[in-house]
Amino acid sequence: MRFLLSLAAIACAALLAGCYGHGEPADPPVGGITATPGDQLVTLTWVPDSGVEYWLYFGPGTTVDVLHPVSIKLNVQPPYVIGGLTNGTTYAFTITGRKDGGPGGSPAPVATAIPRPDGYEWKIGGGAGTNDLKGVAYGTAYDIVGNAGTLFQSTDGITWTQAAGNWAAMAGVTNVNDIIFTAAGYIAVGDAGLILFSADNTNWTAGAYAVPPAPAQNLNALATNGSRVVAVGNGGAIYYSDNNAATWTAATVPAGTGNLYGVAWASTGQWVAVGAAGTILNSTDGSNWVAATSVTPAITTDLRSATSLVSTGIYTAVGLGGQVATSTNGVNWTTESITTNDLLAVAGSVAGTGLFVAVGQAGVAFTSFDGVTWTARTTGSASNLFAVVNGGGQFVVGGQAGTTLYSR
């Protein structure tokens, strides 16, 4: 038995020696590591040295024991993203370095971070021209549209390039007020009934009306349920398309409906459209609309944008004077004012923690999980903000004179 134990000890020692080989420990990176929080994730960065293999140690709390870590990742390089974390929980991180398979050196000073939803912390993005930006969408890329035929595109939501292809020829100098992404591609709408669509984000085609309107109204907003697309606009105009934006048919709308500025659909099956003087319309199919009869307390201020949360189906609309309207079913609404600034756009997160982000006058931004309780966020911008979208792991905002913001 003693002989067998001796053989086992010799084997273990040989294995350890093989693991370390003839390498040596390496110093921690100069400047240590930086931990940047995101939505259920943390991104770690450092300045790596050539030929050094880094091991990462981390766990909840403010300290890390490299001899008994909660979690360990081998052979990592910056930037390194750790996902699956819990928002609101503090995590601690450190790394050690080694060369040629040697033992780890001294750990870097511990860095901590608290993951939080996108929409909490904001940065100024690159400029997208000089015109006001009125709509933004995320699909195969980020598209942002605005006044005087503006369309800029981005792969990261930060750096923007003016659109190529035939966009300029099709849009001219018409104000473009909104854009969305569907399974068939991008769809944009604007003043004087402008409708453009593209499957490849380069070659654009004009949509056609089943019955051409006279006069054509400005179209202000778009929404889709996956198969039908609805556009709303001035004078109570509502149109829908079932063939990927090629042909549009006028919906039935209550007589006397004023300008409509926002539209949304949720998995509850209800469409909602919002607009001037507190107008809220409902529809189960997007083609036949009725006025909402349960709005408490009643409001008379313009509602400028509407959205819904994928995770909960809650609808939220925002408007002038900081007005917010919320509904769990699209039919019964409650209202409140959360700021004296006008709120001009709202979007809901499409994945992860369900979160509304509302933006507006003078760079204001607010977040809410339920559409009822809102928290002010600092954007670093004093520009009016007209558009917001969630996608690609971040919120992206468009605003006055080509201003863009992002939060990830």
Image (tube, rainbow, N blue to C red):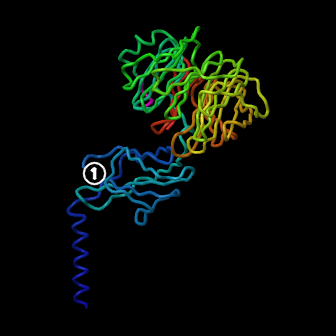
Amino acid at pointer 1: Val
| 253 horizontally vs 229: left or right | right
Q: Is residue 383 visible?
A: no
Our reading of the magenta stretch's main secondary structure is: loop
Which quadrant holds residue 332? Answer: top right
Find the magenta span and give its range: 156-160
In the picture as drawn, the residue positioned furthest to the bottom comes out as 1
Residue 203 picture location, percent across and down:
36, 19
Q: Residue at x 46, y 29 (%)?
A: 181
Q: Is residue 287 above or below residue 356?
A: above
Q: Residue at x 32, y 54 (%)?
A: 97
Local SS, label 1: loop
Q: Is residue 35 above or below residue 175?
A: below
Residue 183 picture location, percent across and down:
43, 33
Nearer to the camera, 368 or 33: 368
| 27 horizontally vs 375: left or right | left
Query: Is 145 colored magenta in this rendering?
Result: no
Work out which quarter of the rendered image holds the N terminus and state it: bottom left
Total marks drawn? 1
| 148 horizontally vs 258: left or right | left
Residue under pointer 1 = 52
Q: Residues within 10 Å of mark 1 (few under 14, many from 20)?
A: many
Q: Is residue 335 visible?
A: yes
Which quadrant holds residue 290? Answer: top right
Residue 28 picture location, percent across and down:
35, 52
Query: Is 158 colored magenta in this rendering?
Result: yes
Residue 356 picture location, percent across and down:
60, 37
